[in-house]
Amino acid sequence: MTKLWGGRFQKSAEAWVDEFGASIGFDQQLVMEDIEGSIAHVTMLGAQGILPAEDVEKILGGLRELNVKAEAGQLEFTVANEDIHLNLEKMLIDLIGPVGGKLHTGRSRNDQVATDMHLFLKKRVAEVIDLIETFQATILEKAEQHVETIAPGYTHLQRAQPISFAHHLMAYFWMLERDKQRFTESVKRIDILPLGAGAMAGTTFPIDRLKSAELLGFSQVYQNSMDAVSDRDFIVEFLSNSSLMMAHLSRFAEEIILWSTDEFKFIELDDAFSTGSSIMPQKKNPDMAELIRGKSGRVYGNLMGLLTVLKGTPLTYNKDMQEDKEGMFDTVQTVLGSLKIFEGMVRTMTINTARLEQAVQSDFSNATELADYLATKGMPFREAHEVTGKLVFTCIQQGIYLLDLPLEEMKKESELIEADIYDVLAPVAAVSRRNSLGGTGFEQVKIQLEAAKALLS
Ligand code: ARG
C-alpha cells in the first residue's frame, strides 16, 4: 500500500517494521478529537479563502460522515496507515476523492497530534474534577453522620488521641480539595492551542490561528511554533497531579483495608464492593481498595516514563513523543475508575460506631488529657508529662486503664489531681474540648463541615 508520504521513497518498509512504528493501536482513542480538529482547521481554511468554499463543503461533508461512523464504532483502522491522523486522512480521500487531500493544507501531523492531545485532556480533566467533587460530597455526607462518633486517632499506627470519626474522614476531603485545585489550575495550560504551528516553523498560508482557537474552544494559542509542537508539559502535569491524587487514594485505601480487618473491625464494606476467596469460604476481601492502592504504582510509573522520554529530546518534534500517549490513556482510565469505585465503596460502607467507641475505652489515648489537666493547674508541661507517664506505667502493671485508677493512687504522683479528673479523662470530653482552630472538637468539626459544604455548593 502506498504511503500518504511516499513520494520520495524508492521502496517501502516491511510490514513488521511498519508495525513497530505505528501508533494506531492506541492513538485511535483520539479519533473524535482528530476529526474535531480537522473540522475546525478546514473551516478556518475556508474562512481565510485558502480553500474554495465548494472544497471545504466536500471535506466537511466527508469529515461529518467519518464522525458518524466513528461514533458508531464503524471505522476500521489499519497499521499500514500508521496513526490516527493518516488513517482518517486516507479514509477521507477514499470517501470524497482527491479533494480530501486538501485538508492537510497548512498543517502538519506535529501540530495536529498536539492539538488532539490538548483536546482530549481538556475533556478528561473536566471529568476527573467532576468525579473528585462527587467523591468529596460522599465523604462529607458520611462525616456529617459521625461528628459525635468517638474513634481512636493514631500516630505511628499507635493509639494517640481520641478523635471525632468525622474529623478523620474529612482529612481526605481536604486532600481531594487540593487535588481538585491542582487539576483545575492545570486547565489553563491545557487550554492552549498548538494548531497552526505546522511542522514546527509555522506556515506560508495566511491561516488564522485565533479563528481555529475560537472554533475549538481554546482561550489561547501557543506563541512559539517550536514550543507548540514539542511541549508535553501539560501531560506531565496531568500525570503528576494524578500521581499525587493516587497517593491520597492509596493512603485512604490502606486505612479502609486495615479498618475492615477482624483486628480493627471499624467498618464493614458492602458485599457489592468486596470479593470472596476461591478456597476459604469465610473470606470477604477488600479487593477494590487493594487494587486502588496497587494502581497508584502504574500512575507513578507513567509519570516517570514520560519524564524520561522527554529528557534530552532536542527541539522540536521527535518520534520519541509518540510514547506520550499510552501512559496518558492508561492514567486517565485508572484515575477515573479509581475515583468512581472509591466513591461507591465509601458511600455503601457501614461504620461500626459501637466498636469505634469501645476501642477508645480500652487504651491510653486519654493520657494527654491528664498531662494537660496538670499543666492547666500550673505544673510545667514537661513535669506533667512525666507524672502522667508514671501513672500510665502503674496502670500497665495492674492491667487497667487511667479511668480505672483510684484517686488516691493518682494523688501519690501529684496532689493537684482532684476528683474531676474522671470527667476530663472521658474520651468524649477529650474530643469535645479540643476546640482549637482546625481541631477535632465537635464545634470545630461542625465549622469545618460548613466550610466544606460551602466549597461544594
Ligand atoms: N503518531 C505520531 C505521534 O503520535 C504523530 C505525529 C507524527 N509526526 C511525524 N513527524 N512523524 O507522535
Image (cartoon, rainbow, N blue to C red):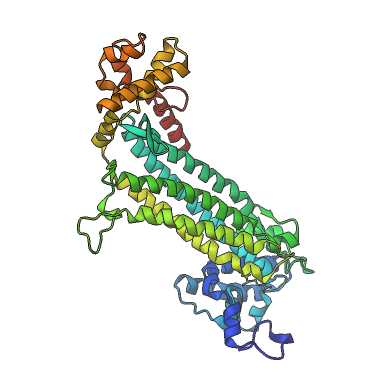
Q: Is residue 33 visible?
A: no
Seen in the picture, residue 138 relative to 339 is either above or below; the reply is above
For the point 63% across and 79% down, the residue is 100
Residue at image x 27%, y 12%?
408
Q: Residue furthest left?
A: 281
Counting from the top left corner in percent of width and height, residue 373 is at 39, 15
Q: How many marks?
A: 0
Residue 455 screen position, x and y as percent: 47, 36
Towards the viewer: 246 or 261 = 261
Location of residue 371 (image quadrant): top left
> In this image, 272 relative to 182: left or right?
left
Q: Residue furthest right?
A: 204
State which quadrant residue 318 falls in. bottom right
Residue 123 seen in the current view: yes
Report x, y in % for residue 323: 60, 68
- Using the image, determine if residue 71 lies above or below residue 345: below
Q: Between 294 and 240, which is closer to the camera in this rendering?
A: 294
Residue sitting nearer the eye, 346 or 31: 346
Q: Quadrant of the N terminus?
A: bottom right
Q: Position of residue 358 (x, y in %)?
A: 25, 32
The residue located at (57%, 85%) in the rendering is: 16
Say left or right for 175 vs 432.
Answer: right
Ligand 1, by image quadrant, is bottom right
Q: Nearer the viewer, residue 412 or 309?
A: 412
